[in-house]
Amino acid sequence: MPFLEINLWKGFDEKKKELLISKLTDVVVEVVGCPQEAVHIIIREVPKENWAHGGVQHSKKFNLKNT
């Protein structure tokens, strides 16, 4: 039972998340050889102010719109 956990900035719309889930599932099925129903995916949305890199919050580093 493959289990994928994805961390993304908060704000991606549902269609983008659906596409990500679909494509990741397809790749896992192809590479691992398991049935689609065996693939589990969790998307965790993290606000940019709670995500930092190099000591700087992403809310201060990036002003991107994901929607």
Image (spheres, rainbow, N blue to C red):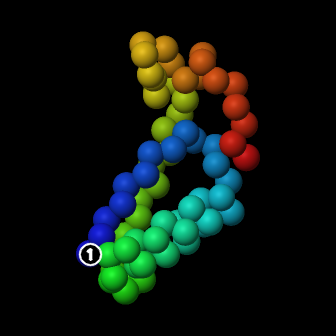
Question: If the image is split into quadrants, where does the N terminus sit?
Answer: bottom left
The residue at the point 48 percent across, 66 percent down is: 24
SS class, disc 1: loop
Kindly identify which residue carries mark 1: 1
Q: Where is residue 28 in the image (x, y as percent from the top left)?
A: 40, 72
The residue most toward the top is 55
Image quarter of residue 34? bottom left
Q: Where is residue 67 in the image (x, y as percent from the top left)?
A: 73, 46
Q: Foreground residue, 38 or 11?
A: 38
Q: Position of residue 31 (x, y in %)?
A: 37, 74
Measured along the vertical axis of the image, is residue 51 above or below residue 6?
above
Q: Where is residue 4 in the image (x, y as percent from the top left)?
A: 36, 60
The residue at the point 46 percent across, 71 percent down is: 27
Left-right relation of 11 to 45? right
The residue at the point 51 percent across, 44 percent down is: 8
Number of numbered tags placed on the structure image:
1
The residue at the point 60 percent across, 16 percent down is: 60
Left-right relation of 23 to 53? right
Amino acid identity at mark 1: Met
